[in-house]
Amino acid sequence: MNELNTAHSPKERKDYLIDYSGFSNIYKTTLVSVDEHACLELPQVLDKEIYESETPHLVLADAITRTLQSLRNLQHEFTIVLLLIPNRWKRAFKVKNELEDFDLHHYLKAISASMNMPLQITNDDDSGALRYFCRCSVMWRASIAIYTKAGGIPWVLANRPEDTAYIGLRYALHNNPNGKSKFAICCSQVFDASGAGLEFIAYEAEDVRIFGDNPFLNRSQMLSVISRSIEIYQRKHFGKKPKHVIIHKNTEFKPEEIDGCFDALTAVDEVDLIHIKQDTPWSAIHLNNYRGKISLDGYPCKRGTSLQLGGHNSLLWIHGASSSLSNNKKQLLKGGKGIPSPVELVRYAGHGSMDEIAKSILALSKMDWNNDGPYVQLPVTLSYAHIMAQIVARMPKLESRPYPIRFFM
């Protein structure tokens, strides 16, 4: 906590990582520790109980849950809970077998979200993030996480239409308690240019159709999901509906899903349904043409390069070389090497230029508030939805209500 208020300069990634000047200087607010009565310790007997138990993950999860519950009456005294878990309890962090798929991080996020209690989890692993040698990097990651989970908006989209809603859909399969059948969990998120309404809903759908490993919703199920998503947008915009809705999905849109989307969006002027395919067989190199002489560039394709493949699909290089993201305005390739692959954009509904769709996806790739890099390799509509699906698929009971995404970061 004290180190977050000190300044640090980068010792790595100096081409794009900027100086950290202290929490209050950056976010224009201060960090204040709570009184001692709100600082709780897990019982020391947990060491023995976790070591001896055949289900150590349940022992630890129950102990932390009870501790979080004891803080509920004190929630008016704090905005975020910082939880430090000793690495000596590592055997209780994850369990995965034919009968159980448990992840302590996901479990605690789900529990704290149900309590409306933002939670920042760390551990004291010697090789963990908190002990990383570049303190500038550590402070940026920790401060962005704390500020965002406390309700702050660290940055917003620039030069994007204010009346556009971006929705991301992601599905997960979850066993019913009787183990005989599966239902789909659809995670839907809503974004806008200002960061308002950054919430998601999780929707349980019985009797889903499954093609391969992917579930698909029927018309009425999709109608319900999109209608609830638009309600989130309206709640943050004084009842006003968006003029343009762009829906991203990591699988194709089936005809019934398309019909369900349009049933929910009858009052919206423009609707784009975009399938973003991350795994594509395409790759490319960048060539220079100087006075008619063709030469191979020293860097791969530029970030933002787009190639139209047909009337309804195109390639987009979200990952690629860029000078605009570099501190010294030289070409920057995140990761430093390799030939970046594009994503393929397939439009199932909508009209107009695919370039505008590509621009919005590039912008959303820079909206990950849980990351200190210049961008991620998917729009945040899908990268967040993937995390949400992993978490809610492990929740024993799913409440059908909107959740702020900050609870799950």
Image (tube, helix red, strand yellow):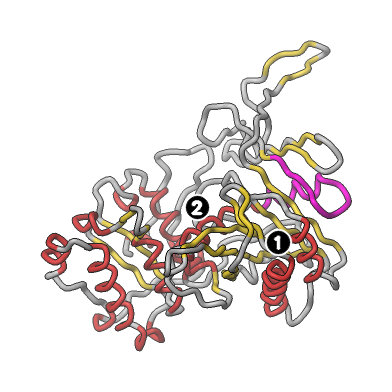
For residue 166, which numbered disc appears in the image? 1
Kind of residue sitting beneath label 1: Tyr
Q: Position of residue 404 (x, y in %)?
A: 55, 72
Q: Is residue 10 above or below residue 150?
A: above
- Residue shown at 50% from the left, 52% from the top: 371
Left/right placement of residue 120 relative to residue 375 reads left
151 or 314, which is in the foreground?
A: 314
Quadrant in which residue 72 is drawn: bottom left
Q: Give me the disc on residue 95.
A: none
Indicate yes or no whether the magenta region holds residue 243.
no
Q: Quadrant of residue 124?
A: bottom left
Residue in view at x 68 percent, y 25 percent: 284
Q: CA distance from mark 1 to mark 2?
A: 20 Å
Give the x, y percent position of residue 335: 51, 34
Q: Is residue 69 above or below residue 275?
A: below
Can you say which quadrant of the picture contains the N terminus?
A: bottom left
**Position of 343 compared to 255: left or right?**
left
For image coordinates 42% across by 43% down, the residue present is: 10
* Closer to viewer: mark 1 or mark 2: 1
Q: Looking at the image, which residue sits at the far front?
A: 180
Look at the picture and state if 93 lies above or below 83. above
Mark 2: few/some/many CA within 10 Å (<14, 14-19, 20+): some
Q: Could one spot residue 169 in this view of the protein?
A: yes
x%, y% of residue 86?
22, 59
**Chain part drawn in magenta:** 344-363
* Image coordinates for residue 101, horizontal then vertical, percent: 37, 58
Determine whether the residue tagged by mark 1 lies in a helix, strand or loop. strand
Considering the numbered disc 2 on the image, is that residue within a helix, a strand or a loop?
A: loop
Residue type beneath disc 2:
Asn
Which residue bears the numbered disc 2?
Answer: 371
Q: Residue at x 46, y 64 (%)?
A: 180
Q: Would residue 350 be counted in the magenta stretch? A: yes
